[in-house]
Image (cartoon, rainbow, N blue to C red):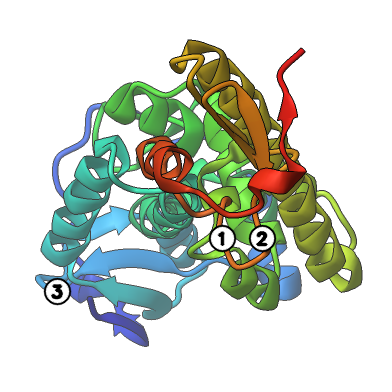
Amino acid sequence: MVVKSTTLEIDKIIVKERKRSLSDLTSLIDSIKEVGLLNPITVNQDMVLIAGLHRLEAFKKLGKTKIPARMIDINDLLTELAEIDENIIRTELTELEKSEQLSRRKEIYEQLHPEATTKAIKESNLPKRKDCVLDNSETKVKSFTQDTAEKTGKSQRAIQQSLQIANDITPEAKEKIKGTSIENKKTALLEVAQAEPEKQLQVVEELQVKKTKRNNKANNQEKYIQLSLLDISYKVDFIKRTVAVNNKWLELPSEYDMDNNSYNNMVMVAKNYQQNKDKSAPLP
């Protein structure tokens, strides 16, 4: 995508037919006289005006022959926008990846519709209105969140949260998050985003510790459940590191990796284990 800042001759800018009348330009002209043009107009590579008709007309009334402009390849922008919309809908992307895609989508949308932002309206002193009107057509420019919600099926609140994740989490914290379970947990990502930048790495570490503890607890509960389903002759107690052989408990030595072994394997150990029989005791 090419975005070029330049100054264009006003009489070479092409304005397509429009059906909406211009608003009063008095305040905009006064602003330009006082501080200059804060928000350049936008044209495509064919010199067709995309956004900024009020600013262009104000420059004409001031008798100016040139105007600051941004020249963009709109086809490239629209193609990338479509690709992002498809990516956001895909389930294989993590929450962090989707958030970063939404952040990029916002950049593109505001390049295509610079007057849709509150900041642009204030800087240009355009009349305040509920919907910002695209200068060269009847189409009303929707807010970024409204347009994205319609394109992706997400709620506007969810989109705002995703932008907070993409914009407020520091690059260092993002690197630490990538590849971990936190990367796909929106609640955890928001917790990181809401923390002070200098504390975010610490928050990530704390979340990872909590996740590990929860996983361990869940694994232990699952082990007890499966323990009760085994044949009474061959039981495995992963917590006490013991196995039952023929109704007798046998303590396993430390070299047996019970945390990373399957139930079937440990039952096989129980069946074949003959050491420490002198330490065994009858089952209660």
Foreground disc of the pair 1, 2: 2
Picture coordinates of residue 33 (x, y %)?
68, 70
Per the image, label 3 sits on a secondary structure element best described as loop
Q: Earlier in the sequence, mark 3 or mark 2?
A: 3
Q: Looking at the image, which residue is at 66% across and 24% down? A: 221
Residue 224, image quadrant: top right
Q: Nearer the viewer, mark 3 or mark 2?
A: 2
Q: Which mark is residue 256?
A: 1
Residue 227 higher or lower than 4, as above or below: above
Q: Which residue is mark 3?
A: 45
Cα–Cα span, label 1 and label 2: 6 Å
Q: Is residue 84 visible?
A: yes
Q: Given contact means CB atoms under 8 Å apart, are the residues at marks 3 and 2 in contact? A: no
Q: Which residue is mark 2?
A: 253
Instruction: Inspect the image, locate mark 1, and give the three-letter code of the amino acid beneath it.
Output: Tyr
Work out whether residue 221 or residue 162 is closer to the camera in this orientation and state it.
Answer: 221
Residue positioned 38% across, 50% down in the render: 109
Amino acid type shown at disc 2: Pro
Q: Which secondary structure, mark 2?
A: loop
Between circles 3 and 1, the one closer to the viewer is 1
Disc 3 to disc 1, how far (Cα)? 70 Å
Whether residues under marks 1 and 2 lie with C-beta atoms below 8 angstroms apart, the answer is yes
Give me the residue at 44% from left, 77% from top. 64
- Name the residue type under label 3: Gln
Callout 1: helix, strand or loop?
loop
Local packing at callout 3 (Cα closer than 10 Å; few below 14, some 14-19, many 20+) is some
| Residue at the image position 57 percent from the left and 24 percent from the top | 222
Q: Is residue 77 left or right of residue 128?
A: left
